[in-house]
Amino acid sequence: MKVKLLKRDPYLITGTHIHKDSSLFWIYDDNQYIGLHKTQFSEQEQTFLLEWFPLPTDTFPLSPFAQTWKNFLEGDSSTFPVDEFTSYRVTHYRSSSNTTSKENVLDIMQSLLPEDTVLIPQTHYYGWIVEYGDSPFLGEEEWQAWSQAMEGDFYHRVSFFIGDPLQVKEHADLHIQLDEKLFDVGVSLQHNNVIFNRASVLPYYLMANYPVKERNALFERILHLFLEEPEMVKTIKTYITCQQNTSQTAKALYMHRNSLQYRLDKFTEKTSVDLKSFEGALLTYLACIHMEVGKID
């Protein structure tokens, strides 16, 4: 359905909650809210879409404190949930609908939360987890362990997008909307990952929103080699993510160091790109992502 709507409204908005914008009307499909511009649809079409894709009627009872956080994160800055100079971080979660009932999912997640955190569900499978205060925020390894526990013990896959630390006085809603867009891209393009953040998703986001023809021109020299030798993509990308360490790369690829070095030398010879320089590594890493994103465009 989303693909068809994109033809009518290329700038539609998707997310886990409704944004306050009078120029949009909202429907709900495939576990996400879709904001459509009123100018792109007649009143009759709007009525039809609202009837066939109604907004969910599920309600999630929140404590007054959690409700204040929810209001604040959705753009209401009239009341701060805590002192305006308090540090906080919002982690978005998205869980698959599997064998565990949707009611139990929220109960399980709530039981796993440490102190000084607030669970704010948007739907039964989407929501935010707010950490606040002076205690150290959870590390990526802890989120990874939590996701593994949910999948291993409760047969429920949960992905997390870890936002940047902020202070309450900053505009939360802008960060929420940006992170939702990045989370969507990460889940769509990085299928093997369950932990995301801005640094890990931003290259994919940039490539997904950059015109394909311009990408092809930008990476032309590198793409010629990648298309001739597809296995080179994984080799080079792994080398860059291993911080250009040949020993770590060879171990990750189960490859002899001499074989790896042969491929690296061949890459440099064919493309004239220096992988040991920051600029060369960045250009090549984006070219690798282009090979992944290009399959979708």
Image: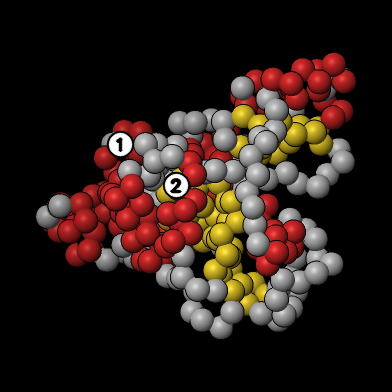
Q: Nearer the viewer, residue 34 or 129?
A: 129
Q: Secondary structure at mark 1?
A: loop
The kind of residue tagged 2 is: Asn
Residue 242 seen by the camera: yes
Mark closest to the chain's N terminus, 1 or 2: 2
Q: Pointer 1: what residue?
A: 230
Q: What residue is drawn where x is 55% and y is 46%?
A: 126
Numbered disc total:
2
- Relative to 220, is 153 above or below? below
Q: Amino acid at mark 1?
A: Pro
Cα distance in 3D space between marks 1 and 2: 44 Å
Helix, strand or loop status at disc 2: helix
According to the picture, the residue beneath numbered tag 2 turns out to be: 104
- Picture layout, residue 107 above or below residue 102: below
Residue displayed at 63% across by 49% down? 60
Q: Quadrant of residue 233?
A: top left
